[in-house]
Image (cartoon, rainbow, N blue to C red):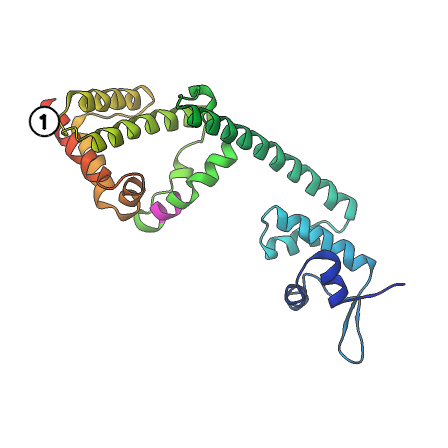
Amino acid sequence: MQYYTVKEIAALTGVTIKTLHHYHKIGLLEPYKMTDAGYRLYGIKELERLQQILFYRELDFPLTDIKKALEDEPSRIACLTKQHKLLCARRQRMDRLLSTIEESIVFTKKGENMDKSAMFKGFDKEEWTEALTEQNEYLKDKYGYDMLDSQEIEPEQMNKQALEAQQFTNCLINGLKSGWRADDERLQKALKEHISFLNEHGTNMDGKSFVNLAKFMLEDDFHRNMLEGQQIGLSYYLYTAAEMYAAKA
């Protein structure tokens, strides 16, 4: 049987010597044997296990989860079959997202608006869950509210809401950059249409409750940064416009 040293494995696979030592230390990939001089030697079985580890790493599995997955699936065929299925699913999602990004680039260069139905093509339930994870963890830690647990994610509905929210935000940004007053008729009209959209999609919202929402977005660090990251002054502008709307209502 042919054996390979750590240095040879590193040259063959592109995995660093330090990483291979770490895999050995945590019991993820143990060498076939150790020489009297303390050198690690690997055989074909260890190479096959390393291949499976690297497939799981490509899927962003944590090392602890990879170890458990390999323990639960001692059969190489079963493990490879599962990895093939996972990688194919990721490739399909990436292909959809790449296609959407490429179309967005083309339309942006032309100065044209992309078809609304295509703007969020490729976002499925799993991707929406991932996109909302950071915000949800913040809400759970600070307010004890689990956004993902309290509502079922419906990708089609989420896509529509995200599109409308972005259009409303773009209107706010345009108004702020153009120097519109917070009570400008164009801005107030957009705000009214935004609230109507929210109510049509299951949110019980009036002028006063929208002011409370805007105030929360202004005072909460995470959500204020979300708005300010798009345009400096946006959170204050939104709150002032909401107050103007509620006063007129």
Q: Quadrant of residue 237?
A: top left
Screen quadrant of the N terminus: bottom right
Position of the C terminus, as image quadrant, is top left
Image location (x, y in percent) of residue 99: 55, 28
Q: Is residue 135 visible?
A: yes
Q: Nearer the viewer, residue 5 or 203?
A: 5
In the structure shown, which secondary structural element does the residue marked by tag 1 occupy?
helix
Residue at 61%, 32% (x, y): give it: 92
Residue pictured at 62% horizontal, 35% vertical:
91
Give the residue type that dot 1 points to.
Answer: Ala
In terms of image quadrants, where is residue 12? bottom right
Q: Which residues are magenta?
A: 136-140
* 146 lies left or right of 129: left
Question: Which residue was labeled with disc 1?
Answer: 247
- Give yes or no for residue 137 being in the magenta stretch: yes
Q: Residue at x 28, y 22 (%)?
A: 199
In the rendering, at what x and y percent does residue 69 appear?
66, 51
Query: In the rendered view, does 32 fall on the left or right side of 150?
Result: right
